[in-house]
Image: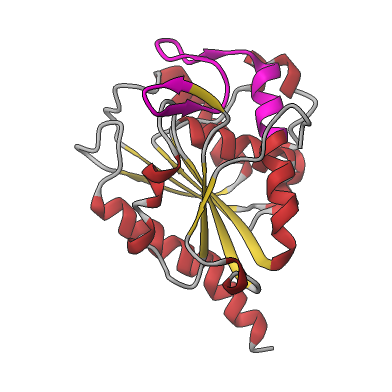
Amino acid sequence: MNPAQPEPVVVWSREAEDREGTPLVVLLHGYGSHEHDLFGLVPSLPEEFTYASLRAPVPMGHGGYTWFDLDPERLAYSSAAARDAVEDLWEWIASVKDQHTSVTLLGFSMGMAMATSLLRARPQEFAAVVGLSGFAVDPGQAEDMQDWFDDDALAAQKVPFFWGRDQEDPVIPEAHIDYTHRWANARVELTKVLYAGAGHGVVPQEITHVGEFLTYMVLRPIRSAGQR
């Protein structure tokens, strides 16, 4: 962890003594939100997992946080700041991952950009990724990330990826969506579902589908391996 960066604030679904040997899901909230936001999904998700919801490091006031400075109108940002934020996130995950059977990332909006960037930097480290109402970073617009992403290795891994969104999402620009489509279709094992009426949010049917995805793509392989 960057010495200037404090340890992240984390809300856990299990006490420390109960986490060993469980699959981990790391929850990454969106711009201006906080660690308790996505934690509200946990009661509707498979209980076999341990869930850890992180607070982004940069305070914005009014109880909200961001992973890095962002222009919310254009979704413009410094690629160097984004890369530093993802590296700091990885350092925390690396400090806890060995007690878990696998690590899955679940990010909403800006949290999806964090999750997909971390997946692309270290594709071998993750069992699956869930992205909700967000986007993947275009390295053509982020010079510091072009040589950092390993999309060829990710394509070989074909990590399961769930992408849920509303086609009429008013927040994520069309150019970001178009790039994310191209990237996901070429690089991951994609499950894409559209939810009319969700806007820039999450609807109950979507949460059900995420739970099914986690069960079939993460829990089922673990159970099958244990039976061999």
* Residue 75 among magenta residues: yes
| 31 or 147: nearer the viewer | 31
| 66 or 212: nearer the viewer | 66
Q: Residue shown at 62%/53% (left/top)? A: 159
Whether residue 181 appears in this view of the structure is no
Q: Residue shown at 72%/34% (left/top)? A: 87
Check the picture and name the quadrant holding the N terminus. top right
Q: Name above or below for residue 42 compared with residue 220.
A: above
Task: Point out the stretch of residues depicted in magenta.
Answer: 60-87
Q: Position of residue 125 (x, y in %)?
A: 72, 53
| 190 or 17: nearer the viewer | 17
Q: Name above or below for residue 58 compared with residue 215.
A: above
Which of the 4 quarters of the picture holds residue 103?
A: bottom right
Q: Residue shown at 71%/17% (left/top)? A: 80
Check the picture and name the quadrant holding the C terminus. bottom right
Q: Position of residue 146 (x, y in %)?
A: 74, 23
| 115 or 38: nearer the viewer | 38
Q: Position of residue 111 (x, y in %)?
A: 50, 35
Q: Is residue 167 left or right of residue 39?
A: left
Q: Is residue 16 left or right of residue 5?
A: left
Whether residue 225 appears in this view of the structure is yes
Q: Residue shown at 74%/32% (left/top)? A: 149
Instruction: In the displayed orientation, state which residue is furthest to the bottom.
Output: 227
Q: Position of residue 180 (x, y in %)?
A: 51, 31
Q: Name above or below for residue 199 compared with residue 42.
A: above
